[in-house]
Image (cartoon, grey):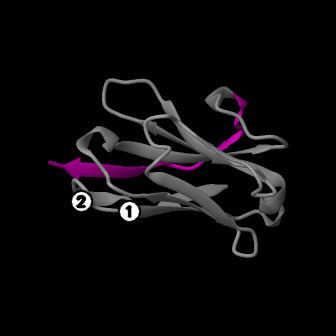
Amino acid sequence: QLEDSGGGLVQAGASLRLSCAASERTFSSYSIGWFRQAPGKEREFVGFIGWRAINTNFADSVKDRFTISRDNDKNTAYLQMNRLTPEDTAIYYCAAKSSQPSRDPGEYAYWGQGTQVTVSS
């Protein structure tokens, strides 16, 4: 089970850090992906971090502004979002899958409930 948190309403240029907390002690063996869905749009890939935290990957639209980290001792992953723009407004979801991470949301077995991020201009 995953729980997303940390969303909110911010102005353009601000930063937010989202958290993804897992209840499973096996969290360290899962890769974590972050996805987002804006109104009227399909869910899109934001970034991922591998289970060993060695590899990360990001969508082109965020790669110079967002970072992902994880603390396996706390069973938590983080999405740090900097220099937010109104185009980043969406519901953000974390997801978990075993083995290697992926950009394909269909490969993730476990999902958080989502947290709303709204960026005003």
Marks 2,1: beta carbons within 8 A: yes
Name the residue tied to disc 1: 16
> Who is closer to the viewer here, 94 or 61?
61
Q: What element does badge 1 sit on?
A: strand
Which amino acid is tagged 2? Val
* Residue 76 higher or lower than 60, as above or below: below
* Residue 96 higher or lower than 40, as above or below: below
Q: Is residue 8 left or right of residue 58?
A: left
Q: Quadrant of residue 52?
A: bottom right
Q: Is residue 40 at least partly visible in the picture?
A: yes
* Residue 20 higher or lower than 57, as above or below: below
Q: Quadrant of residue 99?
A: top right
Q: Quadrant of the N terminus?
A: bottom right
Residue 39, image x and y in percent? 31, 31
Name the residue tied to disc 2: 10
Residue 20, image x and y in percent? 58, 60
Residue 30, image x and y in percent? 78, 51
Q: Which stretch did the figure color magenta?
A: 107-121
> Who is closer to the viewer here, 12 or 29?
12
Residue 13, image x and y in percent? 25, 57
The residue sitting at 32% across, 55% down in the picture is 83
> How far apart, in angstroms, are the residues tagged by discs 2 and 1?
8 Å
Which amino acid is tagged 1? Leu
Q: Which mark is residue 36?
A: none
